[in-house]
Amino acid sequence: MAKETGRKLIAQHKKARHDYHILDTYECGLVLTGTEVKSLRQGRASLVDGFGQIDGGEAWLHNVHIPEYAQGTWTNHSARRKRKLLMHRAEIDKLVGKMQESGLTLVPLALYFKDGRAKVELALARGKKEYDKRHTLREQQDRREADRAVAAARRRQRGR
């Protein structure tokens, strides 16, 4: 079998960018069992309730749902077990320092295979208030309307 290259997206937490201000992102490896990898290769995972935590100098990923592998036997994994993240010591130490601030959390943004290895994109984030969410939606809407107006003006100009 040929070696995989490139990036193959498995799962994405789209609502995270709506619910949080993303301050910094990290790419981390995951410690997985065989049946978890097989389940991920089928494209099955959910990051919705997931979060990261630094515990005892190690990074952990909690509540990420990787369903049991259908053809697995008694060796199958628990769907929501905590999984160890593979990060450099300097990155973990920097995260510990930043996590001392109140209101910061680690949120998984994407789960993917990169050159055949499972990776998770982890974000250091601060939760948005309701008015921040409305403000962001309003900005997106205004930007969309402006783009439409520019496109319509170009079409009218070409039509002459």
Image (cartoon, rainbow, N blue to C red):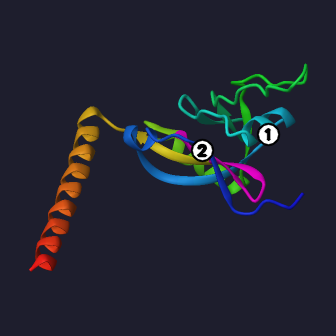
Q: Nearer the viewer, residue 5 or 156?
A: 156
Q: Earlier in the sequence, mark 1 or mark 2?
A: 1
Q: Is residue 9 above or below residue 46?
A: below
Image height check: is 44 above or below 160?
above
- The local secondary structure at tag 1 comes to helix
Read off the residue under disc 1. Answer: 37
Residue at the image position 53 percent from the left and 31 percent from the top: 48
Q: Secondary structure at mark 2?
A: helix
Q: CA distance from mark 1 to mark 2?
A: 29 Å
| Quarter of the image with the N terminus in it | bottom right
- 21 with respect to 27 (left or right): left
Q: Position of residue 148 (x, y in %)?
A: 19, 60
Residue 153: which disc?
none
Q: Image check: 47 left or right of 88?
A: left
Part of the protein shown in magenta: 106-120
Tags 1 and 2 touching, CB below 8 Å: no
Q: Residues within 10 Å of mark 1 (few under 14, many from 20)?
A: some
The location of residue 3, given as percent across then percent down, is 84, 61
Are there few (<14), some (14-19), or many (20+) residues within 10 Å of tag 2?
Answer: some
The circle drawn on residue 96 is 2
Picture quarter with the C terminus = bottom left
Was residue 155 drawn as part of the magenta stretch in this picture? no
Q: Residue furthest left?
A: 160
Please state which of residues 40 and 137 is positioned toward the viewer in this rendering. Answer: 40
**Predominant SS along the magenta part:** strand
